[in-house]
Image (spheres, rainbow, N blue to C red):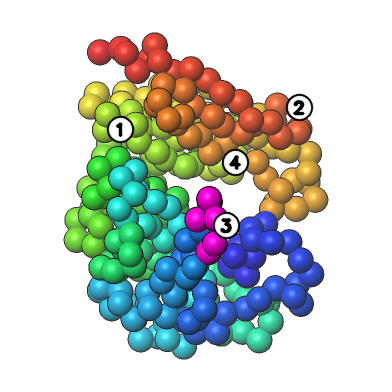
């Protein structure tokens, strides 16, 4: 992961960072049994690339693939993978990420029915942070669907449809949707337009039915450590608890990272 983005993966000297060549047979999505501690390779990057529908461009075969975020759907029946590709380079720290490509891949829990939900071409137009829609049948993502900046979008598992959820509201941060299909929660990066330019950013709640946005919080997210390297940034990354009445998020109002919890039960009861 560190090859494709600074600050991710295991931190070791650069000369010891493993580097994939092509689509690896021994790297991919791993399943770990938390009771036994046993792990197994569910599906390799080579298998993902070979099985993907639509077929990935031939040019990609001349570069190298890396797995990034992987997520179960709420039902535990499907997996989503952010699949990254970089052009060939002898040294991992000389990779040029801006020349790479990103795809959103979905598949069944057994690694079958590999589909490209978001192609590299669509992602390159602007976008970030795919997540599951609560039904496990769609993908939620920030995408530049209208040509003028990010919006919240819902896509079919195979990329055949792409719907802008609230055309008048800008996308940002790490969107996640309440199981009611109505309340969308997100934040903003400190350098995104919806942040405030002073090291603070909002936690946002968007009602998809009414199109109304509520700013839940304005929080400091610029840590002191980020002055040395952007890899030490703090993303709020809000997430629902299992009851879907509270959220957890990161912040650093005094320059040091902490995790906070907020109760949204009363807001969610409003008509």
Pointer 3 local density, CA inside 10 Å: few below 14, some 14–19, many at least 20? few
User: Residue lying furthest left in this view?
Assistant: 160
Horizontal and vertical percent position of residue 125: 38, 61
181 vs 97: above or below: above
For label 2, the SS is loop
- Reading the image, the residue beneath label 3 is 37
For marks 2 and 3, give the CA distance: 38 Å
Q: In which quarter of the image is the N terminus?
A: bottom right
Say whether disc 4 or disc 3 marks the residue closer to the N-terminus.
3
For residue 123, say whether it is visible. no
For label 4, the SS is loop
- Reading the image, the residue beneath label 2 is 254
Q: In which quarter of the image is residue 117?
A: bottom left
> Mark on residue 235?
4
Instruction: Judge from the rendering whether residue 198 lies leftward or rightward of residue 161; answer left or right.
Output: right
Q: What stretch is highlighted in magenta?
A: 33-39
Q: Which residue sits at x=52%, y=74%?
A: 27
157 vs 215: above or below: below
Horizontal and vertical percent position of residue 135: 25, 43
Horizontal and vertical percent position of residue 24: 50, 81
- Reading the image, the residue beneath label 1 is 179
């Amino acid at each position: 992961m560190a090859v494709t983005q600074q600050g991710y993966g295991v931190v070791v000297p650069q000369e010891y960072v493993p580097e994939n060549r092509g689509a690896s047979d021994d790297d991919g999505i791993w399943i770990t049994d938390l009771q036994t501690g046993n792990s197994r390779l569910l599906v390799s990057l080579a298998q993902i690339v070979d099985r993907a529908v639509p077929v990935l461009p031939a040019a990609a075969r001349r570069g190298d693939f890396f797995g990034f975020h992987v997520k179960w759907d709420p039902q535990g029946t499907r997996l989503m993978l952010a699949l990254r590709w970089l052009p060939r380079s002898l040294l991992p720290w000389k990779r040029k990420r801006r020349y790479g490509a990103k795809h959103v891949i979905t598949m069944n829990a057994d690694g079958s029915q590999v589909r490209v939900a978001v192609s590299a071409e669509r992602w390159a137009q602007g976008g970030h942070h795919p997540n599951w829609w609560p039904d496990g049948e769609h993908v939620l993502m920030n995408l530049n669907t209208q040509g003028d900046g990010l919006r919240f979008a819902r896509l079919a598992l195979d990329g055949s449809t792409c719907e802008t959820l609230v055309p008048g509201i800008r996308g940002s941060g790490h969107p996640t949707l309440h199981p009611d299909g109505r309340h969308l929660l997100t934040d903003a990066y400190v350098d995104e337009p919806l942040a405030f330019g002073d090291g603070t950013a909002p936690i946002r709640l968007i009602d998809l039915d009414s199109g109304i946005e509520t700013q839940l919080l304005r929080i400091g997210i610029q840590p002191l450590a980020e002055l040395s390297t952007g890899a030490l940034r703090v993303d709020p990354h809000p997430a629902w608890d299992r009851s879907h009445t509270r959220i957890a998020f990161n912040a650093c109002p005094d320059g040091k990272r902490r995790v906070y919890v907020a109760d949204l039960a009363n807001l969610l009861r409003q008509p």
